[in-house]
Every structure is written in structure tokens, then in C-alpha cells.
Image (tube, rainbow, N blue to C red):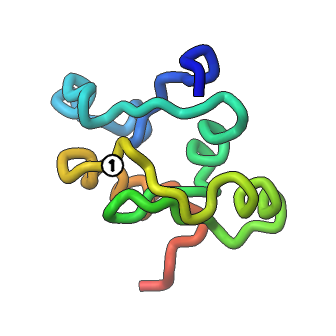
Amino acid sequence: MPGTFLIGAHIKKRALCSDAERRGLANIAMLACTFGCDAVYEHGYVTVAAGGTLQAADSPEVATYIQEKLAGRTVSWWNDSREPYYQWHRTHTFKDVPAA
């Protein structure tokens, strides 16, 4: 995708990061497309599972978009250093959090 359609995004919400996490830009930030990927991630309709596969919430509001464009794809930004931040997103933002 051309860089003009990518935006800098935070894996974990910046306002909830510690000072040390904010300084770790290589692990806390990722690129997201402006065609909707950034918004559906930010609002918890998709998350990144351990290993980098996109996980979609069961949400009728955005189901068609997610199923056609995102579900099951692998994210190249996932790595072991970023996993704690993706895990934070899965447990604090993702709308399909399983019951404990």
C-alpha cells in the first residue's frame, strides 16, 4: 500500500502508557491504513492475536468490512517485543474478550 494511505498508530493507547512505554516507539507504534484499519483497531473491532494474526470481533456493525478486508490476515508488525502491547489491546480494547 502506498505510504500516503498509512498513518502512525499506537498499539496500546498512548494516554495509558507509562513514560518508559512512550519512549519505546519501536514497540508501541505501528502503521495502519486510513481506509478503516486504524479506526476498527482503535475502537476494538479487530485485534492482533499472539503470532500476528488479525482477530475480528463478532460485530454486526462492521462485519462485512472486517470479513472482506481483514479477518485472518497476518500483521507484519507483530513480534515478541510488541506482543505485550497487542496483548494489552486484546484485554482492554477488543470487543470480543472471552469470559474469564
Quick check: 15 left or right of 4?
A: left
In the picture shown, does residue 5 fall above or below 84? Answer: above
Direction from residue 5 to residue 23 in the image, left or right: left
Relative to 62, residue 30 above or below: above
Q: Nearer the viewer, residue 84 or 18?
A: 84
Furthest-top residue in this view: 4
Q: Residue at x 21, y 23 (%)?
A: 23
Residue that label 1 marks: 78
For the residue pair 87 and 79, the one nearer the viewer reads as 79
Tell me the amino acid under the disc marked 1.
Trp
Report the number of discs. 1
In the image: residue 91, left or right of residue 44: left
- Residue situated in front as seen by the camera: 5 or 55: 5
Quadrant assignment for the N terminus? top right
The percent coordinates of residue 95 (x first, y second) are 60, 64
Secondary structure found at label 1: loop
Residue at (58, 71) in percent of width and height = 96
Quarter of the image for residue 29 reads top left
Pinpoint residue 56: horizontal percent, then vertical percent: 61, 65
Q: Is residue 98 above or below residue 70?
A: below
Residue 3: x %, y % from top left: 54, 18
**Residue 8 in the image: x percent, y percent?**
47, 23
